[in-house]
Amino acid sequence: MIISFHYNIGNQGIFHNSIMFVKKALFAVPNSKSLPIGLVARFSSATGDIGVTVNDKTGVATVKLQRAPVNSLNTGFLKNIESTLDSLEKEKARGLILTSGLPKIFTAGLDILELYNCTTESLTTFWTQLQSTWLKLHATSFPSVALINGHAPGAGCQLAMSCEYRIMLGPKYTIGLNETKMGIIAPFWFVDTMIDTLGPRQAELALTSGKLFTSSEALKVGLIDEEVGSEEEGVAKAEAFLSQYATIPGTARKLTKLMIREKTISNLVKNKDKDLKNVIDLITSAQVQKGLGLYLQSLKKK
Ligand SMILES: CCCC/C=C/CC(=O)SCCNC(=O)CCNC(=O)[C@H](O)C(C)(C)COP(=O)(O)OP(=O)(O)OC[C@H]1O[C@@H](n2cnc3c(N)ncnc32)[C@H](O)[C@@H]1OP(=O)(O)O
């Protein structure tokens, strides 16, 4: 476990001539490392790595997801993300920028290997962790921005939608809930989140077709809030968005957010077991297993 807390020195970034400016450890982020982007692949692991950088002037934490090759979300990585959010809550972070440390991919969504050839037991562990990580992200007390610097299909889109503001790097990447394209059904809380984000009409069109939106299409329907031409521009816009909360009393902000999100959150909290049963029934069916196998093969053939 590396316990590190990285400061942005005068907003110049944490790496200068490949030297990390690292101040003393202030809190623990389990299994976390802060890595130069070019080194990401070397640190790939079952649980992934999470780079956390906190700007000491603003208290905003930038969290970089790093699980090569595509930041797919397995049980360990989701647990790692949840622990990171717990640490940020404990240390009273003033804001979150959630982004990817990998080139081209925000996250490829759920790790299909957790769904394919799974047992009821392994699927239960995985799905329970997914529910728990999502609940934490969706209800953070601090404001959150998803800086979507690559593709964000499936649960990648779900994570982004749970942040309060979405900034996407254009024009090459896509985002959306593509479950129906895979012959599966998005869980009700993914659907609720998309309805909260797009409204019922656009959500229905998007979900039934499993649409993956380009950044400009996503902007048009309100799936993202801003499209940017570079990561630097994205970071600047994310910081600008978060800076407006510097003068807003935190408790009033948090309670307002939770009031607006309460219905979607409590729908999952009250129906966790039902959701799990739906998933087990669907995912372990022979037909869905066959489809997932073919989907995995098609990804590998590319
Ligand atoms: C009630 C049940 C509800 C279940 C809900 C599910 C929500 C989900 O999130 S389902 C998953 C949705 N995600 C996808 O469909 C994404 C699939 N992946 C892609 O479209 C592409 O990989 C990409 C656009 C993300 C990246 O393309 P790129 O060309 O850069 O890389 P690839 O060569 O395709 O992939 C590299 C490597 O990674 C493997 N892989 C890709 N995605 C996943 C994944 N989601 N899970 C596991 N593994 C994945 C891919 O097979 C390649 O593996 P190899 O290197 O071994 O060939």
Image: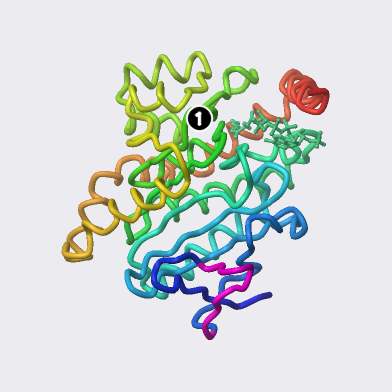
Say above or below: 284 vs 237. Answer: above
Q: Which residue: 33% across, 73% down?
A: 57
Q: Is residue 176 magenta?
A: no
Location of residue 252 in the rendering, given as x and y in whole percent from the top left corner: 17, 61
Location of residue 302 in the rendering, given as x and y in whole percent from the top left corner: 78, 23
Question: Which residue matches tag 1?
Answer: 175
Say above or below: 85 vs 108. Answer: below
Under tag 1, what secondary structure? strand
**Amino acid type at image mark 1:** Ile
Q: Quadrant of ligand 1?
A: top right
**Tag count:** 1
Say above or below: 103 vs 157. Answer: below
Q: Quadrant of residue 200?
A: top left
Q: Which residue: 50% across, 30% down?
A: 175
- Horizontal side of 109 relative to 6 (left or right) equals right
Kindly tell me whether mark 1's CB lies below 8 Å from ligand 1. no
Viewer-closest of 242 and 20: 20
Say above or below: 279 vs 269. Answer: above
Q: Which residue: 33% across, 56% down?
A: 239
Location of residue 218 in the rendering, given as x and y in whole percent from the top left corner: 40, 26
Viewer-closest of 64 and 14: 14
Image quarter (top left, top right, bottom left or bottom right) of the N terminus: bottom right
Which segment did they paint magenta? 14-24
